[in-house]
Image (tube, rainbow, N blue to C red):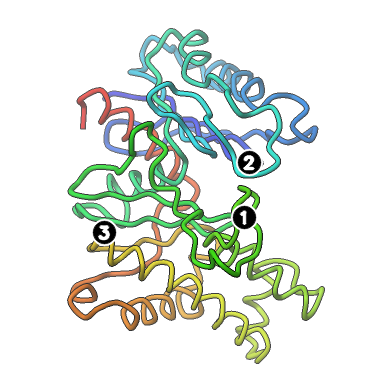
Amino acid sequence: MKQYLAIDIGGTAVKLGIVDETGAVGPKAEESVNFDGYQTPVLTTVLKAAKAFVETQNIDVNTLEGVGVSATGQIDSRKGIVAGTCGNFPNYINSPIQAELERLFGLPVTVANDANCMTLGEVWVGGAKGYTDVIGVTLGTGVGGGILTGGRLLEGARGLGGELGHYRTHALDGVPCTCGATGCWERYAATTALVRAAQERDPAWKDGRAIFAAAEAGNETVLALLDAWTDEIAQGLAGMVHIFNPQLILIGGGVSAQQKLLIEPIAAKVRASVMPAFAEGLEIRAAQLHNDAGMVGAVYYFRQQHGEA
C-alpha cells in the first residue's frame, strides 16, 4: 500500500498526517503556526513540525512515495512557492515550500492551494466522488474555492486559479477588501462577514456558534441577518453556475454543518437565481471530509501530478 506524507498549512495551524493510496488518513498531528504572531516564519514551523511528526511516528521516509502539501494563500504550484496573500500574514510570501521539504526529506513534493485541495479531496473520496464538474467553496475567515471542470482542477497559468473569494460582487459600491480591491465576494460571504454584522447588533453574538444558537432559538434579528448573508452567498454562486455549469456545489467550512439554516436556504436561492436549464440536475450540499479534506486533497493532487491517479 503506497503511503504519503500530507501537510495542510493554514493561517492558525499546520496539520500533518499519513494518507494512503485509497485516501484513508492514518496518524495525524497539529501544530500552531501563529504562536508568536508569525515572528517565526510559517515555513520554519512547518519544517520543524514535519520532522518531529515522522520521528514521533517512527516513519521511515524511504517508505513514503512523496509529500503532498495544501497551503493557504496564492500558491504558485508550478514552483511550489507562496506567490501572495490577502492581508497581514508576515514571513509567508515567497516561502519556498516545495524546495525546503524536498531538501528535508529527499522526496518529491507538490504544493497546491488549500481550497483547491479541499475540492480535490472531496472528488477523490468525499461528497463529490464520481463527479466531473464541481465548485467547492469554503466559508470561514475568508472565502476559498476550487473548481473542477471536465474532471480536471482549474488552475490557470501558474496554479493560482479558482480564487473565488475575490470575485467582485459589489465592485462599484462595496466595502474595501484586505486584497486592496473593493467589493470582493468574501467581504460579504465569509463567516466573518456574518459575525461582523451580528456584532453590530449584539456583542454577545461573537462567533458562528453563538449566532446559529440564537437562530435556532428563533431570534428574528439573527434570522434576518442569516437571510441577508445567505443571499450574498447564493448570488455569488449563481454567477459561477452560469460560467461553469457544475453538476455539484459543495460548501465547506465549520458552518457547513448547518443544514437547515445554511445549506438548504443557499440551495433554494441559487436554484431560484439561475436560468432554468442551469438549475436542472444541480446539486448543492455540505462537504464531507471536514478537517481532513486539505490533507487528502493534497495527496490526490500529488498522485495526479505523478500519474498515479
Between 35 and 96, the one nearer to me in the picture = 96
* SS category of the residue bearing label 2: loop
Residue name at image x 25 percent, y 31 percent: 304
Distance from Cα at disc 2 to Cα at disc 3? 29 Å
Marks 3 and 1: which is nearer the front? 3
Label 2 neighbour load within 10 Å: few <14, some 14-19, many 20+? some
Which quadrant, please, contains the N terminus? top left
**Residue behind mark 3:** 244
Q: Please tell me in which quadrant of the rendered image residue 281 appears.
A: bottom left
Give the residue type at disc 1. Answer: Thr
Distance from Cα at disc 3 to Cα at disc 1? 25 Å
Q: Earlier in the sequence, mark 2 or mark 3?
A: 2
Label 1 neighbour load within 10 Å: few <14, some 14-19, many 20+? some
Residue 141: assigned label = 1
**Residue behind mark 2:** 11
Marks 2 and 3: which is nearer the front? 3
